[in-house]
């Protein structure tokens, strides 16, 4: 009888140990799988961040090329305009004609400068928006990720 009680106690203890071991093993496996999924998600998120920075740098490079080309074109046009104005001024037959040509040239130059400045400002603004768009999208993704984490 004492042996039977001991056998039952041993069997009961063994079953309890197996249940605890199984539950513990399942919990470890579940936590490991969750951790692996989180690591994979973090890796993918990091990759998307790098891709956003690369896209931003490419947009910046393209924009700087456009800005440089625009600046060179305007400078070339301005020099040509100055040369043409100087030639025109040299053909003046009177002081009055010289002053009128100079005033016309000054007015036209100022208007061209203001128009170019406005257009150039729009170009720079567009380049800035295109350059920052991928980074802004990643900041939005971080915000969404934080909201999702807070909701858990």
Image (cartoon, rainbow, N blue to C red):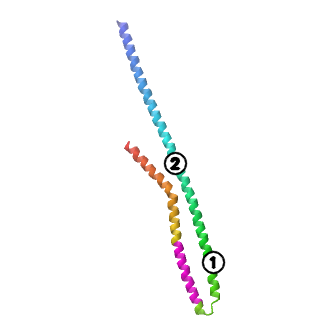
Q: Which residues, given as a range, are shown in magenta?
A: 98-117
- Residue located 48% across and 42% down the image: 41
65 w.r.t. 48: above or below: below
Q: Would you say the magenta stretch is mainly helix, strand or loop?
A: helix
Q: Which residue is mark 2?
A: 48
Quadrant for the N terminus in the image: top left
User: Does 90 sit left or right of 25 as displayed?
Assistant: right
What is the x, y in percent for residue 115? Answer: 52, 75
Q: Which mark is residue 18?
A: none
- Residue located 63% across and 82% down the image: 84
Give the image quarter of residue 55: bottom right
Q: Earlier in the sequence, mark 2 or mark 1?
A: 2
Separation of disc 2 and disc 1 at Cα? 48 Å
- Residue located 37% across and 10% down the image: 6
Q: Which mark is residue 80?
A: 1
- Residue located 54% across and 79% down the image: 110
């Amino acid at each position: 009888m004492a042996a039977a009680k001991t056998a039952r106690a041993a069997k009961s203890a063994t079953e309890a140990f197996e249940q605890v071991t199984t539950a513990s093993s399942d919990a470890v496996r579940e936590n490991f799988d969750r951790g692996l999924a989180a690591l994979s998600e973090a890796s993918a998120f990091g990759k998307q961040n790098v891709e956003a920075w690369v896209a931003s740098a490419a947009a910046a490079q393209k924009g700087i090329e456009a800005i440089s080309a625009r600046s060179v074109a305007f400078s070339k046009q301005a020099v040509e305009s100055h040369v043409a104005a100087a030639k025109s001024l040299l053909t003046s037959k009177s002081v009055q004609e010289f002053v009128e040509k100079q005033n016309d040239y000054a007015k036209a130059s100022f208007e061209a400068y203001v128009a170019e400045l406005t257009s150039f400002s729009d170009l720079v603004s567009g380049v800035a928006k295109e350059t920052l768009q991928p980074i802004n999208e990643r900041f939005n993704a971080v915000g969404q990720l934080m909201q999702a984490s807070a909701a858990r």
